[in-house]
Amino acid sequence: MQPGGQKKRLKGYLITVAKLFAQGIPFAFLAFIAVLVWARIFQSFAGLDAWLYLVGVMVLLAIGWGVLNILLTYALWFPVEHGWKSFVPQGLILFACIFAIDILPLHFLVTPLANLGYVPYVVGFVVINLLYAFADGWIAMKLGPHWKIRGIPTAAEDYVAFTPEPPIPVDNPKALHCPRCGKTNLVVAKDNSAYCLDCDRGIRKERLGGTAG
């Protein structure tokens, strides 16, 4: 491999690591907060009330994480589908994974850290979140492609070097006008049907009239 290629590949890896961290740190932080809320609920309530509040918090957290992962995946990697069919499954899967690797272990670490004093608690909070950020980011990144918009690379890593296809050139020798928007940015076929680049929709030949030849 040429030196330039190695440098470009290294840059791609660094960008990917930075994006994983950026995607994971919000989930790691929220997992830590969830543990504190969990402990607070059981301090303030007892029996069935505590469990009902806890389930409610979990449901809201799962839905919120699904929406958050859509936004982060769109901002960092590639466009993904919106709507409840996207954020609900993502949120539930994210919650199950992060609950197992973040929330449960943190539940047993929060009290010992708090007993050490304010400074160790803050240092521990920062270190733990940094460590969890990459794991959470990797999980969140792997979920995104299952709801990606078609035509975008499947692997998030491939998107680092992804070059979008060039725009479709206008092919409208007779300067025909779109019957919807009135513009001439059309790609006209031989049978005089066309596609409007501004409306992003096709046009039947009957609506244009004449011939394109």
Image: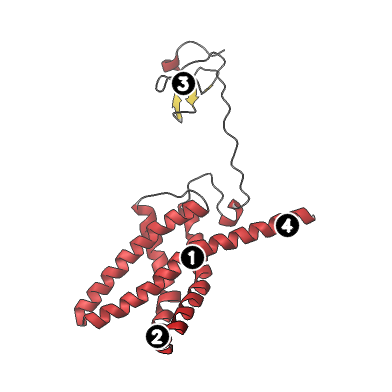
> How many numbered markers are drawn?
4
Residue annotated with mark 4: 7
Residue annotated with mark 3: 183
Q: Amino acid at mark 4?
A: Lys
Q: Distance from label 4 to label 3 (Cα)?
A: 45 Å
- Residue 72's tag is none
Q: Are marks 1 and 4 in contact (CB under 8 Å)?
A: no
Q: Earlier along the polypeptide chain: callout 3 or callout 2? A: 2
Q: Distance from label 3 to label 1 (Cα)?
A: 45 Å
Q: Distance from label 1 to label 4 (Cα)?
A: 26 Å
35 lies left or right of 28: left
Q: Amino acid at mark 1?
A: Gly
Residue annotated with mark 2: 114
Q: Are marks 3 and 1 in contact (CB under 8 Å)?
A: no
Q: Amino acid at mark 3?
A: Lys
Residue 26 picture location, percent across and down: 44, 65
Q: Distance from label 4 to label 2 (Cα)?
A: 44 Å
Q: Secondary structure at mark 4?
A: helix
- Residue 24's tag is 1
Q: Residues within 10 Å of mark 1 (few under 14, many from 20)?
A: many
Residue 38 picture location, percent across and down: 31, 77
Q: Secondary structure at mark 3?
A: loop
Q: Earlier along the polypeptide chain: callout 1 or callout 4? A: 4
